[in-house]
Structure formats: structure tokens, C-alpha cells
């Protein structure tokens, strides 16, 4: 019996999916089935109730999962501590990020990290917010990058920087001449929004509701890039993170207008499973993510 087999079993128990367990461990679904069968032969007991309706561990499977989790965690801790003693930073970091952070916030941090640790492979997946949480909880990735982080007893939240929310409009729009505008003055405006299930959309809706402001939602999109393109053709105005419009402001395809009367910000955070053993590479990457000066230096 190998540690790898116990890890595959733990991942299967947590994801409740042979497909996802195979993805996490970079093996085939058939290999997952073979390793589970091997464990069942070794312990001479059924570990999983085979049913098309629902995945379920047997009592013996539950017991094996509890002990296997401890064994795998102990092994990961040992491996990480040995790397730290030898001052080794290597391996792979798997990251799932929402589009706006991945496209606009993450690049300078990865650039600095790879400059210091060129042997580390950083794999980045662009996902919707709910999928980032699913990937982290399912061990598909090591870290998730989200905005307006939600609370979950199974997750550790690492606060990062805060991005200001600003109004954007077409250069010929009536609001483009204003340096700042009160939220109440947006009443009745055609508005380009994010999808209803996106945390930034929920935060913007709350800002408008708190100010008793009703806008005309004409379009909703699930990513920041499409929102900006719609505003660029003067289909409406929008409220977006300031860090996501640097390029458009520099080439004058959009105009940024400050929102007056309050502090309107979007908190960013890294998330990982609680009690997850963080490798030296992951620890160093988190340290760079928490350094707010990186983005500032990159923008100079």
C-alpha cells in the first residue's frame, strides 16, 4: 500500500466523483477505480457502496478515510518541513481565480514569484466565483482567488488588497465630464451589470439599494471584459473595480468617474482548505500576494 493510493481514496471521498479524483491526481478514471479495488482487496472489505444514484462510503470506508486523511496530512507535513530545512522551493501551485483577478491583479505577483522561484510551475485556471470555491473544497486546486470572500467553516481566508469600485462610461456620455458623482445621481441610467450570482454584482446591488437608487439594467455579463466592451459602445454605464480598467483609461476608450459619499471597495482574498499543509512554494506565493506594493510597483 502506498501513500498515493490513500490520497486518491481521500480525494474520492471528498469529491464524491471518480472523474474529479482522477483530475486532482492527474491519472485516469480507470486508475482511480483500480486503486480503490486494490485497497478493498488489501483490507478485505467493501469501501464504497456502488450505486448510480448516490456516492456513499461504507462504515469501513468512513473509518479508512478518517485514518487515511491523518496519514496523508502527516506525510505532507513531513515533506513540507524537509523542504523548508533544505530551503527548497519547488513543485507546482494550482490556482483557480475569477477572471478579473486573474487578468488584471494576478500577473505582477506571478512575475515577481517566478523571478525568485523559476523552478516552480504555477498553473492558473480562470473560473466563475462559485466554481473557485468548489475547486478549492474538492482539492482540485491549492489556492482560490476571489472577491468579497464568503464564510465557510472548511475554508481559510487570507485577506489581500482592497480595490476601489468606480463608475465607468463612454467618453461622450453626459457623466464623462464629472470628476466624481453621487450614487443617487445614477438613478434611471442604463446600466451594464454582472450576472446576478456574482459577488461583485451583489455588492453593487446593495450599494444602489442602500442609496434607494434604481437603475435600468440593460445587459448582464459573467465577466469584466464583456462588461467593459458593452460600456465602450455606449450601451450603458457600469460600476467596476478600478484595477480592471487601467488599459482602457490609458487609451481613452473609457472614462473613470469616482463615486462620492462613501467608501466603495471590493475586498480580494486567497482561500484554501482549512488544515491544508502548505508547501514552501505556496507559503512564498501567499507572502507575495499579501504584499500590496507589488501591484503598485508594476503600475509605475
Image (tube, helix red, strand yellow):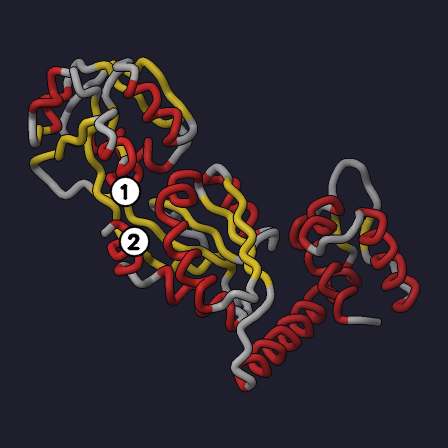
Of helix, strand and loop, which one carries label 1? helix
Q: Quadrant of residue 112?
A: bottom left
* Residue positioned 44% across, 52% down in the render: 152
Q: Position of residue 268 (x, y in %)?
A: 33, 50
Can residue 209 be seen from the camera position used here?
A: no
Which of discs 2 and 1 lies nearer the camera? The answer is: 2
Res. 164 mark: none
Q: Is residue 20 above or below residue 160?
A: above
The residue carrying pointer 1 sits among few (fewer than 14), some (14 to 19) or many (20 or more) residues within 10 Å by Cα, namely: some
Q: Position of residue 216 (x, y in %)?
A: 25, 14
Q: Position of residue 139 (x, y in %)?
A: 60, 55
Between 237 and 37, the one lying in front of the other is 237
Q: CA distance from mark 2 to mark 1?
A: 12 Å
Of helix, strand and loop, which one carries label 2? helix
291 displayed left or right of 174: right
Q: Which residue is mark 2?
A: 298
Q: Which residue is mark 1?
A: 243
Question: Total number of numbered labels?
Answer: 2
Amino acid at each position: 500500500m502506498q501513500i498515493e493510493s490513500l490520497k486518491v481514496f481521500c480525494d474520492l471521498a471528498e469529491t464524491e466523483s471518480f472523474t474529479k479524483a482522477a483530475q486532482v491526481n492527474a491519472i485516469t478514471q480507470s486508475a482511480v477505480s483500480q486503486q480503490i479495488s486494490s485497497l478493498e482487496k488489501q483490507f478485505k472489505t467493501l469501501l464504497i457502496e456502488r450505486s448510480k444514484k448516490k456516492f456513499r462510503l461504507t462504515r469501513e470506508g468512513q473509518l479508512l478515510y478518517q485514518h487515511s486523511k491523518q496519514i496523508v496530512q502527516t506525510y505532507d507535513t513531513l515533506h513540507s518541513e524537509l523542504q523548508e530545512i533544505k530551503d527548497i522551493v519547488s513543485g507546482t501551485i494550482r490556482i483557480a481565480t475569477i477572471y478579473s483577478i486573474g487578468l488584471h491583479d494576478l500577473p505582477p505577483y506571478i512575475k515577481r514569484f517566478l523571478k525568485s522561484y523559476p523552478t516552480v510551475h504555477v498553473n492558473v485556471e480562470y473560473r466563475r466565483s462559485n466554481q473557485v470555491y468548489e475547486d478549492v473544497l474538492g482539492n482540485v486546486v491549492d489556492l482560490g482567488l476571489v472577491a468579497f470572500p464568503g464564510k465557510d467553516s472548511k475554508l481559510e481566508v487570507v485577506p489581500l488588497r482592497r480595490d476601489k469600485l468606480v463608475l465607468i462610461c463612454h467618453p461622450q456620455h453626459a457623466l464623462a465630464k464629472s470628476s466624481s458623482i453621487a450614487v443617487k445621481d445614477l438613478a434611471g441610467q442604463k446600466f451594464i451589470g454582472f450576472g446576478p450570482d456574482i459577488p461583485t454584482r451583489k455588492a453593487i446591488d446593495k450599494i444602489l439599494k442602500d442609496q434607494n437608487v434604481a437603475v435600468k439594467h440593460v445587459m448582464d455579463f459573467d465577466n469584466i471584459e464583456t462588461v467593459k466592451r458593452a460600456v465602450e459602445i455606449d450601451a450603458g454605464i457600469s460600476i467596476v473595480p478600478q484595477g480592471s480598467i487601467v488599459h482602457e483609461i490609458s487609451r481613452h476608450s473609457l472614462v473613470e468617474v469616482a463615486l462620492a459619499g462613501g467608501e466603495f471597495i471590493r475586498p480580494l482574498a486567497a482561500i484554501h482548505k482549512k488544515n491544508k499543509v502548505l508547501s514552501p512554494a505556496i507559503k512564498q506565493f501567499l507572502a507575495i500576494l499579501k504584499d500590496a506594493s507589488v501591484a503598485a510597483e508594476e503600475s509605475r
